[in-house]
């Protein structure tokens, strides 16, 4: 082999080694500059990407199900609208025919009671005067509770000891409360069992027992324990109002079992 060629081959080999050594040195320097702990774990990134892909697929599946359910929902809405129209038509027809039927029933009831009327005509009375006396609602006490307010003259007629600091507004507001209590008791008495909670049903049975007693039968009433405001409460003022109303003939009081029962009276 020629000496020159051998020398050049040796020089190129040495240069190649020097280049490789320099590259290795740069890699060592780069490794020291960026520790392994700071390099992102590509496997974790891949796992996160796969999880995101699964979530996106689940969202797509859910959207597809919702889109498929839209026609069914439209059919249900259309059916509901048709049912609503049917019920409205039924309501219109019932409301237009019911009063006429009730009038016929009232006429039948009146005819059954008319034979007693001629006995009263000798006194100069008319049939119309006796009609209110035979209305079933009056006998059963199902009408509205009486609102028999007191007047300023009645309040002024009381002794100052009985009147105390009571005003006309306070007493008449208490009369409103009493009517509200009595109306609530009436609704409980007439309510069916299936519409009442267990505790209310027990109270309804208790009120029914009270309503069938002789002093209370057919009248509106409330219990002393019903006095919870806003105007009539079970305090000294409330007791004073009850005393005034008993004195003026607006209420009467009786005791049934362990209950104090207040009966609302009507004008004579």
Image (tube, grey):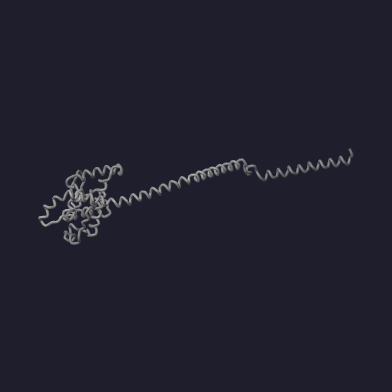
47 sits left or right of 210 in the view: right
Asked whether the viewer can see residue 192, the reply is: yes
Q: Nearer the viewer, residue 21 or 253?
A: 253
Q: How many marks?
A: 0
Q: Residue furthest left?
A: 122
Rendered view: 136 above or below 168: above
The residue depicted at 22 percent of the width and 60 percent of the height is 168
Q: Nearer the viewer, residue 63 or 258?
A: 63
**Residue 246, image x and y in percent?**
18, 53
Would you identify the image quadrant in which residue 40 lies? Answer: top right
Q: Nearer the viewer, residue 196 or 141?
A: 141
Would you identify the image quadrant in which residue 46 lies? Answer: top right
Asked whether the viewer can see residue 268, the reply is: no
Q: Nearer the viewer, residue 123 or 239?
A: 123
Q: Residue furthest top?
A: 1
20 sits left or right of 147 in the view: right
30 sits left or right of 138 in the view: right
């Amino acid at each position: 082999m020629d000496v020159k060629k051998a020398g050049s081959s040796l020089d190129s080999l040495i240069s190649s080694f020097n280049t490789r050594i320099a590259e290795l040195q740069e890699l060592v320097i780069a490794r020291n500059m960026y520790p392994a702990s700071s390099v992102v774990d590509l496997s974790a990134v891949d796992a996160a990407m796969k999880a995101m892909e699964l979530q996106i697929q689940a969202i797509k599946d859910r959207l597809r199900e919702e889109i498929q359910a839209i026609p069914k929902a439209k059919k249900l809405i259309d059916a509901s609208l048709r049912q609503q129209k049917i019920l409205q038509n039924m309501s219109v027809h019932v409301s237009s025919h019911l009063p006429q039927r009730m009038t016929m029933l009232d006429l039948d009831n009146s005819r059954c009671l008319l034979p007693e009327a001629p006995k009263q005509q000798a006194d100069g009375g008319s049939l119309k005067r006796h009609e209110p006396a035979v209305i079933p609602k009056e006998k059963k006490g199902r009408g509205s509770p009486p609102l028999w307010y007191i007047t300023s003259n009645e309040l002024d007629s009381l002794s100052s000891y009985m009147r105390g600091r009571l005003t006309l507004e306070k007493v008449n507001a208490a009369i409103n409360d009493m009517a509200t209590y009595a109306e609530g008791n009436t609704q409980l008495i007439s309510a069916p069992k299936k519409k009442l909670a267990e505790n209310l049903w027990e109270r309804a049975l208790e009120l029914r027992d009270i309503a069938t007693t002789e002093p209370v039968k057919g009248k509106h009433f409330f219990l002393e324990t019903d006095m919870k405001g806003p105007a009539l409460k079970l305090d000294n003022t409330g007791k004073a109002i009850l005393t005034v109303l008993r004195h003026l003939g607006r209420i009467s009081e009786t005791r049934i079992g362990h209950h104090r029962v207040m009966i609302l009276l009507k004008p004579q």
